[in-house]
Amino acid sequence: MSVSIVNLTRGTVLAESAELAASFLARGLGLMGRRRLSEGGGLILYPTNNIHMLFMRFPIDAVFVDREHYVVGVRPHLRPWISIAWCGQARYTIELPVGTIAASATEIGDRLELTPPLR
């Protein structure tokens, strides 16, 4: 399933076609084994409030979002192999290409809209 992600607070787009990782296996594999994450792409890990960068080949931006779709954490430029990030209030996490947080001006407290919505 392809999901678009819009920051309603800022009027910016975080992803035009993010993938949804909703199963245990899909969340566990995440972006491992991939060489890059395309511009406009992303991966929504649902449900989870933490990620690791083990076995990753490239850095990413991560956005942590609560049940009401408010941003509760942002972690720009997580480096491969050494970074771990979590946010206790998050219901799901969005992995994005590096620079997406800055380009979209996404901050804690912003409200996101996912189309189609998560179930």
Image: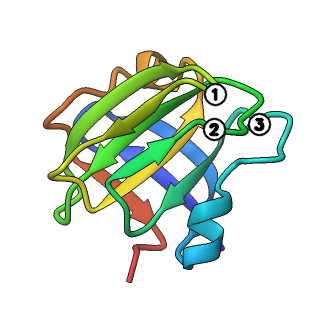
Q: Nearer the viewer, residue 26 or 104?
A: 26
Looking at the rendered image, the disc whose residue lies closer to the viewer, 3 or 2, is 2
Q: Which residue is mark 1?
A: 81
Q: Which mark is residue 54?
A: 2
Q: Nearer the viewer, residue 40 or 44?
A: 44
Q: Residues within 10 Å of mark 1 (few under 14, many from 20)?
A: some
Looking at the rendered structure, the kind of residue marked 2 is: Leu
Looking at the rendered structure, the kind of residue marked 1 is: Trp
Direction from residue 57 to residue 118 in the image, left or right: left
Looking at the rendered structure, the kind of residue marked 3 is: Ser
Residue at image coords 83%, 47%: 33
Residue 7 at least partly seen? yes
Image height check: is 91 above or below 75? below
Direction from residue 64 to residue 18 in the image, left or right: right
Direction from residue 90 to residue 42 in the image, left or right: right
Element assignment for label 1 = loop
Q: Are marks 2 and 1 in contact (CB under 8 Å)?
A: yes
Q: Which residue is mark 3?
A: 38
Mark positioned earlier in the residue sequence (2 or 1): 2
